[in-house]
Image: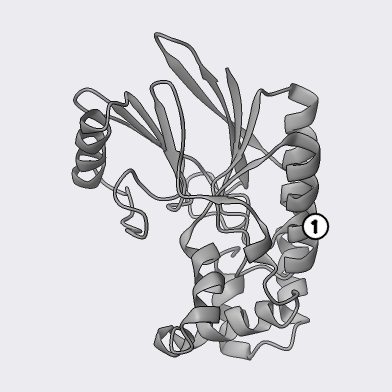
Amino acid sequence: MRIAVLSDIHSVSSALDAALRDARSEGFDVLLILGDLLTYGVNPAETLELVHEAVARDGAILVSGNHDQMYLDTASEPDYLARLPDWLRETVEWTAARISPGALAGFDWQEQWAAGPLLAAHANPFAFGDWTYLADTASADAAARTLVQRGYRYGIFGHTHRARRFEGEGADVFTVGSLGQPRELADPRLQWAMIELREDRIDVQPRFVPFDRAAHQAAIRATTLSRPTQDRLCGFFA
């Protein structure tokens, strides 16, 4: 089984478009989008349009992330935004004003997705809504133990925006890079992953997309966001 995994898009529609084109050209059995469609970037409407197309054309499976739940929860929890840091709240409000109400609610969200020995979720294999980062050996070992307890040998997750492999006892844990906000200092390219899953092994390979960082920063500067928020968002692409 070939699984194209796209994660943490964060309203960067150009990178999503490039990844979808590349994945279709390479071929896949499953297109898996591991959440965080919005926030940070400046093309939320275009991003959602591409995701709708991927669902209709490719049967894309959408797994909900914390930034997806952020928009879904603000509709039912009016105080949710008030608890966010100022720059993040401003970014969410700016994004929400540029998409139709209930835009994310129209997708068929999954909390997780599984195929044979593989479990995929946005952040980790723990309970849905637990957004713990798998950023070190201790958290990865805990994830591996949970995978084994649940009957899986492999776990694929996003959320950290960094491509990593942890070989735990009884299970291997992978995190994939981001299409919308690089956090890998050694190689800050935007990326997705192609997975080949066989009965006895798994192969996870990164796929990189071209991206104009200067143009993206200029687009952020051209918004009505406050200067401190612009600085924070541009800082991820410095």
Q: x, y percentage for residue 20?
A: 75, 39
Q: Quadrant of residue 105?
A: bottom right
> Along the line of sight, which residue is nearer the eye, 222 or 201?
201
Place of residue 27 in the rendered image (x, y in percent of width and height, measured from the top left) = 73, 22
The amino acid type, in three-letter code, at marker 1 is Glu
Where is residue 98, by image quadrant? bottom right
Picture quarter with the C terminus: bottom right
Judge left or right: residue 119 versus residue 217: left
Q: Secondary structure at mark 1?
A: helix
140 relative to 231 in the view: left or right: left
Q: Camera-side residue: 150 or 11?
A: 150
The residue at the point 72 percent across, 49 percent down is 16
The answer to whether residue 81 of the structure is visible from this angle is: yes
Tell me the residue that label 1 is attached to.
49
Residue 157 drawn above or below residue 205: below
Q: Above or below — where is 105 with respect to 166?
A: below
Q: Please determine whether, in this image, residue 102 is positioned above or below residue 168.
A: below
Q: Residue shown at 67%/77% (left/top)?
A: 95
On the rendered structure, is 13 left or right of 178?
A: right
Residue 43 seen in the figure: no
Q: Nearer the viewer, residue 83 or 56?
A: 56
Residue shown at 32% from the left, 58% from the top: 130
Q: Quadrant of the N terminus?
A: top right
Crowding around mark 1 (Cα neighbors within 10 Å: few <14, some 14 to 19, many 20+) is few
From the viewer's perspective, is residue 57 above or below residue 172? below
